[in-house]
């Protein structure tokens, strides 16, 4: 039983479930961030306050943080296991599209993790009182950050890499959850491409609009 629980397949299954939850969260986060484009800061600050205080949202927040932790830890463990099982690189490599994106998934994920730590310091840790800042006016915090060119470039690079990561991750999660099918696989591929383009582009559009037009 323990071998099953700690097998590579079970880790991939848990990682796929955690990743799927994160995929559902990103459109919600994007929808809230679109309020940053309004001149009135009240709607975004009210939404941020609601997300920080409503009990059900706080439960979801815990689940989200747990999903992030599981996705990261399992991803690192699986990558280490892959390295250990293949100490010598194969002379003949699979050149398929999936393997190409899979090859870089660990590194794009690592870059996104670095950005998440910075993002937490700028927002989540302020809410918890661990870092100085105005937790009642995250609208101003976001606008100030997006006007810093260095932060904006880092933000855009990370969301570009997130798009690459999402394109592979969505297909990988569907495959792990047993959704492979000659009819559904092309649909999953198309949806993953649309999702990987729209979500990062939405976040990038908000950041660029604030920096250059607001």
Image (cartoon, rainbow, N blue to C red):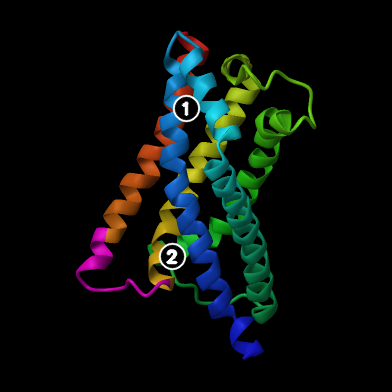
Judged from the image, the secondary structure of the residue bearing numbered disc 1 is: helix
Real-space Cα separation, disc 2 to disc 1, in angstroms: 27 Å
Furthest residue toward bottom: 1
Instruction: Give percent across and percent down for residue 199.
Output: 40, 39
Q: Give the crowd class for mark 2: few <14, some 14-19, many >=20 residues within 10 Å.
A: some
**Is residue 211 covered in magenta?**
no
Instruction: Tell me which corner region of the image, top left, top right, bottom left or bottom right, holds residue 157.
Output: top right
The circle drawn on residue 59 is none
Furthest residue toward left: 183
Residue 35 is left or right of residue 81, and the answer is left
Give the magenta-colored segment's residue range. Answer: 177-187
Instruction: Tell me which corner region of the image, top left, top right, bottom left or bottom right, holds residue 118.
Output: top right
- On screen, residue 48 above or below 99: above
**41, 69: nearer the viewer:** 41
Judged from the image, the secondary structure of the residue bearing numbered disc 2 is: helix
Instruction: Tell me which corner region of the image, top left, top right, bottom left or bottom right, holds residue 88.
Output: bottom right
Instruction: Give percent across and percent down for residue 121.
Output: 72, 32
**Which quadrant does the N terminus fall into?**
bottom right
Q: Which residue is mark 2?
A: 172
Q: Which residue is mark 1?
A: 33
Instruction: Give percent across and percent down for residue 8.
Output: 58, 79
């Amino acid at each position: 039983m323990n071998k099953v629980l700690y097998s590579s397949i079970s880790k991939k299954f848990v990682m796929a479930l955690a990743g799927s939850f994160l995929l559902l969260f990103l459109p919600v986060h994007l929808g809230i961030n679109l309020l940053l484009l309004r001149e009135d800061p009240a709607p975004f600050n009210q939404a941020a306050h609601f997300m920080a205080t409503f009990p059900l949202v706080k439960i979801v927040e815990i689940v989200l943080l747990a999903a992030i932790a599981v996705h990261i830890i399992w991803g690192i463990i699986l990558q280490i296991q892959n390295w250990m099982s293949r100490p010598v690189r194969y002379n003949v490599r699979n050149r398929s599209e999936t393997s190409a994106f899979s090859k870089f998934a660990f590194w794009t994920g690592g870059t996104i993790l670095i950005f998440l730590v910075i993002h937490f310091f700028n927002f989540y840790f302020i809410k918890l009182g661990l870092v100085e800042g105005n937790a009642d006016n995250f609208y101003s915090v976001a606008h100030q950050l997006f006007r810093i060119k260095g932060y904006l470039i880092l933000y855009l690079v990370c969301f570009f890499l997130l798009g690459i990561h999402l394109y592979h991750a969505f297909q990988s999660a569907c495959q792990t959850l047993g959704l492979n099918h000659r009819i559904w696989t092309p649909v999953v591929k198309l949806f993953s491409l649309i999702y990987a383009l729209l979500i990062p582009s939405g976040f990038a559009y908000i950041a660029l609009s604030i920096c250059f037009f607001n």
